Image (cartoon, rainbow, N blue to C red):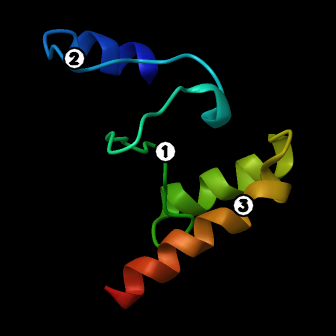
Amino acid sequence: MREAAERALSEWPRFESVVGSAEDTTLRPRGVIAWVWNSRRTAGSAFAEALERFLERWGTDHISVRDTYRVREQADKRS
């Protein structure tokens, strides 16, 4: 994703891409940051439900992280 952002935003003179963890990104006071992450539905269509079953069986860490998807789904329902 960082590489895609660098290609898309390379003409913006104030755009800066920093490699590293959040603690090492050299953020400055009054700076601007964009958070980007993937989110997906886990139910509601045959595809979403089949993908969930596939990931439960074959995903290396899916079961330990899947509850984080529910937070987004609950937030969507409140909007």
Q: Horizontally, is 59 left or right of 1 in the view? A: right
Mark before the other along the chain sequence, 3 or 2: 2
Q: Which mark is residue 66?
A: 3
CA distance for labels 1 and 2: 17 Å
Mark before the other along the chain sequence, 1 or 2: 2
Residue at 85%, 57% in the rendered image: 64
Residue 11 lies in quadrant = top left
State yes or no: discs 3 and 1 in contact (Cβ < 8 Å).
no
Crowd rating for badge 3 (residues with CA inside 10 Å; few <14, some 14–19, many 20+): some
> Along the line of sight, which residue is nearer the eye, 41 or 77?
77
Q: Quadrant of the C terminus?
A: bottom left
Q: Amino acid at mark 1?
A: Trp
> Along the line of sight, which residue is nearer the eye, 28 or 40?
28
Residue at 32%, 13% in the rendered image: 6
Above or below, 13 against 33 in this view is above
Residue that carries the numbered disc 1 in the rendered image: 37
